[in-house]
Image (spheres, grey):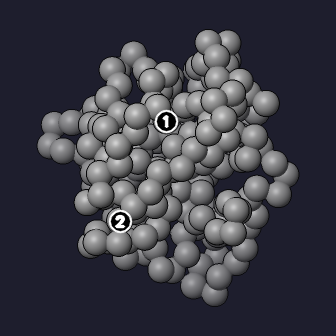
Amino acid sequence: MRTFSDATRRNIAAACASFARLPDVAEPSALKRAAVVLALTASCDGDDTAFLLTRRASSLRSHRGQWALPGGRCDAGETPVEAALRELDEELALRLSPDAVLGLLDDYPTRSGYLITPVVVWATESAALAPNPDEVASVHRIALDTIERDDAFDFTAIPESSRRVIRFHHQMSLIHAPTAALIYQFREVLAGRQTRVTDLEQPVFAWK
């Protein structure tokens, strides 16, 4: 168990600092910039460390009802860290300062035209989350022990692509990329492994 403590925060910050991100592409990308948050907080019982995962509202225009990390598109002139912190506040009423950021993972290009930057943050005060019903149907605390199980992830093939499709098994649900890929890379960072995920495929329903 990774207890929710200052020691765990320091260990995860050190793991993020040891992770060498892929370099940014030099030329401008046609992909739209976006950011998501791996917000680390206390688990439901208050002892273990967990991250926040949401179900998107059914009223949203795209990816309605899907599992997702908090986040969204970067506004003009906004850095991925600024966008991540803003979206966390807008979606869950969880307001954090930049010093809560522990590190960044690799940018992930999606089939739907976004380049997503995952931002890892430490959320000490998260007892009073208030999901915005226009964006979030529900919010869940996923203990880190869950993603470190041997059977937490698997890979499958689809006829539409030669790339492997990653799946995260959570309760009775299958969570796919990009969310599953970003969580998987975070699991690998915690274990001290430099594992890349940009080649992991999304299911066809997430291509639009």
Q: Is residue 97 visible?
A: yes
The vertical placement of 6 against 73, above or below, is: above
Tag 2 residue: 57
The residue at the far right in this view is 150
The vertical placement of 21 against 68, above or below, is: above
**Which quarter of the figure is the N terminus placed in?**
top right
Q: Where is residue 187 drawn, in percent x and y?
A: 69, 41
Amino acid type, callout 1: Ala
Tag 1 residue: 39
Q: Secondary structure at mark 1?
A: strand
Amino acid type, callout 2: Ala
- Horizontal side, residue 22 vs residue 94: left or right: right
**Which quarter of the figure is the C terminus placed in?**
bottom left
In this rendered view, identify the residue nearer to me: 23 or 116: 116
Q: State the image quarter where residue 144 is shown.
A: top right
Q: Residue at x 73, y 47 (%)?
A: 146
Q: Where is residue 43 drawn, in percent x and y?
A: 62, 36
Q: Where is residue 197 drawn, in percent x and y?
A: 61, 52
Q: State the image quarter where residue 202 is shown.
A: bottom right
